[in-house]
């Protein structure tokens, strides 16, 4: 499973980092009705979901936390089977938006990637920058991450993400 996970989330993007999945109200609206009873990272397409791939990294020693939109906190923990791992703030932390379907190529040096609409999809932060964000919901994280990333997120075609429910079929191999 880990080899398959690396096809969707290549090691270059994750490194030796903590992983935080987040989603906001915009994700829930865009991906309705699939997000009525689950966070976006639980939406399955083909072999798995973003959660499947992140959980494979968790099984290989990466600490994982999830920050859903406010109404989805308990459901997120129940579906994951745990509340969260203790993150090691000495390591960098990768934030993944729940709408991410696949990462490709190599990550940018900017530390953050946005989609064409300017929504943050991936960011890599270190230590103290992360600490204040972990206290927040996914919606707050989505807004605050842009402030923490120097120079702002860089738009990239290397991240495939879902704007609508049918996007899951478009990337399904």
Image (cartoon, grey):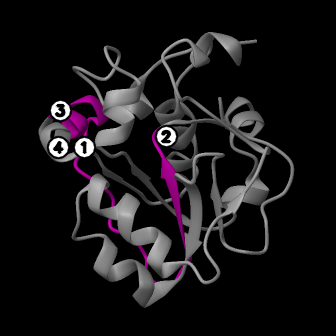
Residues at circles 2 and 1 in contact by the CB criterion of under 8 Å: no
Please say if 32 is above or below 159. above
Residues at circles 4 and 2 in contact by the CB criterion of under 8 Å: no
Q: Secondary structure at mark 3?
A: helix
- Look at the image and give the residue range highlighted in magenta: 75-98
Tell me the number on the disc at residue 27: none
Q: Residue at x 80, y 43 (%)?
A: 104
Tell me the number on the disc at residue 82: 1
Distance of mark 4 from mark 2, alpha carbons? 18 Å
On the image, numbered disc 4 is attached to which residue? 73
Residues at circles 3 and 4 in contact by the CB criterion of under 8 Å: yes
Distance of mark 4 from mark 1, alpha carbons? 12 Å
On the image, numbered disc 3 is attached to which residue? 75
Which circle's residue, 3 or 2, is located before the other in the chain? Answer: 2
Residues at circles 4 and 1 in contact by the CB criterion of under 8 Å: no
Q: Secondary structure at mark 4?
A: helix
What is the quadrant of the C terminus in the image?
top right
On the image, numbered disc 2 is attached to which residue? 55
Q: Secondary structure at mark 1?
A: loop
Distance of mark 3 from mark 2, alpha carbons? 17 Å
- Residue 46 coordinates in the image, percent (x, y): 61, 11
Tell me: 46 left or right of 7. left
Is 85 one of the magenta-colored residues? yes
Which circle's residue, 3 or 1, is located before the other in the chain? Answer: 3
Distance of mark 3 from mark 1, alpha carbons? 11 Å
Please tell me how crowded label 3 is: few (under 14), some (14-19), or many (20+) other residues with Cα within 10 Å: some
């Amino acid at each position: 499973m880990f080899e398959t996970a690396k096809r969707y989330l290549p090691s270059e993007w994750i490194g030796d980092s903590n992983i935080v999945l987040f989603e906001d109200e915009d994700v829930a609206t865009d991906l309705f009705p699939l997000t009525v009873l689950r966070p976006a990272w639980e939406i399955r397409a083909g072999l798995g979901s973003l959660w499947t791939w992140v959980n494979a990294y968790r099984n290989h020693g990466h600490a994982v936390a999830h920050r859903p939109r406010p109404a989805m906190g308990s459901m997120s923990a129940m579906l994951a089977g745990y509340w969260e791992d203790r993150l090691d703030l000495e390591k960098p932390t990768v934030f993944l938006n729940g709408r991410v379907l696949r990462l490709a190529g190599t990550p940018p040096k900017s530390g953050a990637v946005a989609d064409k609409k300017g929504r943050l999809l991936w960011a890599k932060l270190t230590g103290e920058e992360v600490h204040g964000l972990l206290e927040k919901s996914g919606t707050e994280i989505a807004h605050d991450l842009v402030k923490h990333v120097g120079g702002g997120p860089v738009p990239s075609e290397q991240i495939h993400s879902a704007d609508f429910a049918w996007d899951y079929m478009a990337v399904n191999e």
